[in-house]
Image (spheres, grey):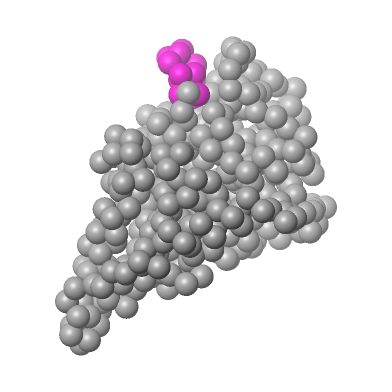
Amino acid sequence: MRSCVLDVLERESSFLILIHSNADPDAVGSAVALKEFLKLKNKRAEICCQSVNRMGKYLLKNLGESIVSEDIPEADAVVILDTASLSQLGTCAAYLNDDTRTVVVIDHHRESSFTQYVYLCEDRTSTAEILFDLLPQKNKKINLALLGGILTDTGNFKYATRQTFQTVEKILGEGVELYEVFDMFSEHKNVPKRIAIIKGCQRSKLHKIGNYLVITTKVNSHESSTATFLTQVANVVFVANEKGSRIIAKASQDVDIDLSRIMKEIGQLYNGDGGGHRKAAGASGESISEALDHCVELVRAALFKKPNLLQETKDQGKYRDADEST
């Protein structure tokens, strides 16, 4: 499949690169890297995205790039990056209506609804890792963009694998310093984010399931940062953004649970979509902030299928979890 993707990149002369709404640095970095590679090949490329998150904006600014959402020029081919479903593209999904164009999908998520296209999916921690191995020609801008995506999608290497570090070592060997990437995401006294996290803590609800702690809460912004902060004390966290109609789910490394499946089910039940990774996923839909209790029930169902957890619970004489607000 790699050769098929490279054939398209070599054959066509103009490209439209699509990434998911509320794009994170993995999506943004992968798109910027691909666009820069195509420019090196004297080809035209534009990145289309409905919205970009805060960290993605930092990356765009430091790389001197921009993203468009309307008045998109015609293109011979479409490349979809780091996106598992049509609904995640938002308004940019309209650019797939032309059946005459070649469509390529490059992604690392475990489930996808785009398999009818030229589809490259690998079990890596980020789409940026796949792009690094795929692209035969690179420069410093490409490597910075890809390393930015790898850094954030692995939680500053917290979820990195041996293969991830091998990729990072290769990037550093090509003239990129690690501090350069960290500097692109540095935040100085980000008061709004800290306020959002504090409010998330104030509104949080604690659910005890066996020996596991699950926290649910609601915020109006910075839901991903809030979820990351709360995983320092809980095994699983669900944070709903009431304005953005989405839920972010994160889990600590010590709990064996597949959040991508839970978020996919939640998205479908609330007329939206969801997915992601085993330990970090998200869902969007109608009135989805009301789905938090449902998320807890799905965690309960997933955990209680495990014999060891059932035995732990029985040994303690606890057959029902205790819920309490904090």
Q: Residue 35's image quarter? A: top right
The location of residue 227, given as percent across then percent down, is 49, 58
Q: Name the residue: 43% across, 52% down.
A: 218
The location of residue 224, given as percent across then percent down, is 52, 52
Horizontal relation, residue 303 to residue 51: left or right: left
Horizontal relation, residue 231 to residue 10: left or right: left
Q: Name the residue: 46% across, 19% down.
A: 94
Quarter of the image where the C terminus is located: bottom left
Q: Residue 299's image quarter? A: bottom left
Q: Residue 249's image quarter? A: bottom left
Is 248 or 196 nearer to us in this picture? 196
| Numbered range of the magenta stretch | 92-103
Q: Please say whether residue 265 is visible from this viewpoint.
A: yes
Q: Please say whether residue 170 is visible from this viewpoint.
A: no
Vertical position of residue 56 compared to residue 293: above or below: above
Q: Name the residue: 53% across, 23% down.
A: 78
Horizontal relation, residue 323 to residue 152: left or right: left
